[in-house]
Amino acid sequence: MESQDWKTDTWEWARGKLVISQPVLGTVLFTYDGHMIADVMPFIVSTFDQVLAQGVRADMFVNLERMTGYDSDYRRAVSQWGASVQSRCGEHHFFVRSRLLALGIAVSNLAAGGKLQVTTKRPEFEAAIARSIARHSGAGG
């Protein structure tokens, strides 16, 4: 679904990478690949803070299809960060293929008050992104 004209920032290490894309202001897509560690957190925080600084209530989309795992320090840090920005965000959608990741998100969802939406169906995830893009670009009302 990713397009060449989207604003994109990338963080990489030997065992994985994270690409944060913004098709339009207000729609942010996190695409994970490989194994994540807590070292990614400054990248996540600074990239997302740039969006929030523009005064928009951003919808967050997290594609975990190609994530192979994560360290417990990363899980704790990303959960704490997510909780800290949740009230300033719109929708939260996750695309997963792994039951382990789905379980981890389900645990986080308890703390998030049930606001996190998880799917294993790519068309559902992409449709939600398209609706967000349309809404934030003024084309969807």
Image: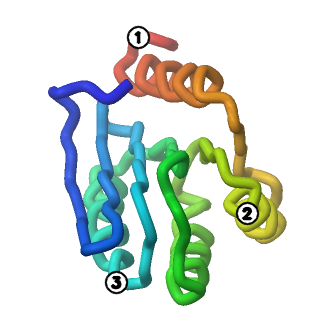
Q: CA distance from mark 2 to mark 3?
A: 21 Å
Callouts 3 and 1 close, C-beta under 8 Å: no
Q: Residue at x 52, y 62 (%)?
A: 68
Rendered image quadrant of residue 26: top left
Q: Earlier in the sequence, mark 2 or mark 3?
A: 3
- The label nearer to you, 1 versus 2, is 2
Residue 82 at what x, y percent from top left?
56, 68
Here the colouring is rainbow
Type of the residue with mark 2: Leu
Q: CA distance from mark 3 to mark 1?
A: 37 Å
User: What residue did someone put label 2 on?
Assistant: 100
Is 65 left, or right, of 12 in this rendering?
right
Q: Residue at x 42, y 83 (%)?
A: 38
**Residue 119 seen:** yes
Type of the residue with mark 1: Ala
Return the mark for residue 139: 1
Q: Few, some or many C-alpha atoms within 10 Å of disc 2 (few <14, some 14-19, many ≥20)?
A: few
Q: Secondary structure at mark 3?
A: helix
Rendered image quadrant of residue 32: bottom left
Q: Earlier in the sequence, mark 3 or mark 1?
A: 3
Q: Few, some or many C-alpha atoms within 10 Å of disc 3 (few <14, some 14-19, many ≥20)?
A: some
Q: Secondary structure at mark 1?
A: loop
**Residue 112 seen:** no
Kindly give the residue lying farthest to the bottom in the view shown. 73
Residue 44 at what x, y percent from top left?
35, 67
- The label nearer to you, 3 versus 1, is 3
Is 28 left, or right, of 97 in this rendering?
left
Q: Few, some or many C-alpha atoms within 10 Å of disc 1 (few <14, some 14-19, many ≥20)?
A: few
Q: Is residue 1 above or below residue 71?
A: above
Return the mark for residue 39: 3
Return the mark for residue 73: none
